[in-house]
Image (cartoon, rainbow, N blue to C red):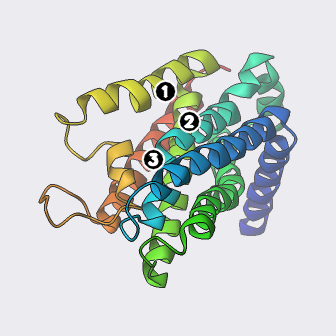
Amino acid sequence: MSVSSSRKITQVLGAELDKLVTLPLIWLTLMGTIIIQFVLTGAFTYAGLQEAEGTQSILDTGFASMGYLQAGFIILGILATCSEYTGGQIRTTLTAMPWRGYQLSAKHVALAILTIPVAFIIAASGVLYAFIMMRDTAVAIEIDRLIKTLAGATGYLTFTTLLSAAIGALLRRTTPALVVLLGYYFIVSPLSGDFLPNYFPDTAGAYMYMLPSSDNINTLTPMQGTGISMLWTLIFITVAIVFYRKRDA
C-alpha cells in the first residue's frame, strides 16, 4: 500500500511539473522578470555609483529591485493555479487525477521546484552585477552575510509565489487574483505600512534578506521573518486545499 501511495504521489508530482514547464506563459513571465531585474539593477547601481565613495552597500543595491521583482513571482504563482480554469482544462486534470488533495499539494511542490532555482539566479545576478560595477567603491561584503541574504531573498520570492498560487486556487480566476494580490503588495501595503504591524507576508518576508536594525525595536530577525512568511504560506495553501476538495470544478 505504501509503495502504491508513493508511486501515486510521484506520478502526480511529475504530471504537475510537466504541466508547469510546458506552459508558455510561465516562461514568458520568468523571462520578463529576468529582463526587468537587469534593467532595474542597472538603474539602482548607476544611482549608487553617484554616492560618496565607500558609503554604498553592494547588497542593498543588488536587492533594491526586490520590491518590484516580486510582481513577476506573484504572476507566476497565479498562472500556475489559474491557467487550467481558463479553458476548462481543470476538468481533464480532475478526471485523470481525482485525488484533489494530492493534486493541489503536488502543484505547489512542483511550483517550488521550479521557483527556487529561478529565484536564486535572479537574486544572485542582482548582487553579482552590483559587485562587478561597485567593487572598487562600495563597502566590502562578508561572505556569511552574503549567503544568508541570498538564501533569504530566494526563500521570500518562493514563499510569495506559493502564497500567490494558493490565492489563485481559491479565486480560480486570473484577473481577480491579480487585482487582489498586486493591489495589496503595491498599493495597500505601501500606503499602510506605517500603521500595520510587521506580521503580514510582505513586510515580514522582507526581513528574510534584510538585516534587522538595532535602532528599531519593532524589526524582526531573519528567522522570525522566515517563520511568519512560512506560516502565512502554509495557512493559505491549507485553506486552498480544503476549498478545492469541497467545490465543484
Which class describes the residues within 10 Å of circle 3: few (<14), some (14-19), or many (20+)? many
Left or right, 91 with reference to 80: right
Q: Which amino acid does label 2 sit on?
A: Ala
Provide the residue designation for mark 2.
Answer: 71
- The residue at the point 64 percent across, 54 percent down is 112
Left or right, 181 with reference to 94: left
155 or 30: nearer the eye? 30
Provide the residue designation for mark 1.
Answer: 182
Residue 40 position within the rendered picture, expressed as x and y whole percent measured from the top left = 58, 44
Q: What residue type is labelled 3?
A: Thr
Residue 205 position within the rendered picture, expressed as x and y whole percent measured from the top left = 39, 52
Label 1: state its secondary structure: helix
Is label 2 in contact with label 1 (beta carbons under 8 Å)?
A: yes
Q: Which mark is nearer the camera, 1 or 3? A: 1
Image quarter of residue 123: bottom right
Q: Which mark is nearer the camera, 2 or 3? A: 2
Label 3: state its secondary structure: helix
Image quarter of residue 107: top right
The mark that comes first in sequence, 2 or 3, is 2
- The residue at the point 79 percent across, 32 percent down is 25
- The residue at the point 45 percent across, 73 percent down is 148
The mark that comes first in sequence, 1 or 3, is 1
Is label 1 in contact with label 3 (beta carbons under 8 Å)?
A: no
Q: What residue type is labelled 1?
A: Leu
C-alpha distance separating marks 2 and 3 = 17 Å
Left or right, 228 with reference to 154: left
Provide the residue designation for mark 3.
Answer: 233
Which class describes the residues within 10 Å of circle 2: few (<14), some (14-19), or many (20+)? many
Res 173 seen here: no
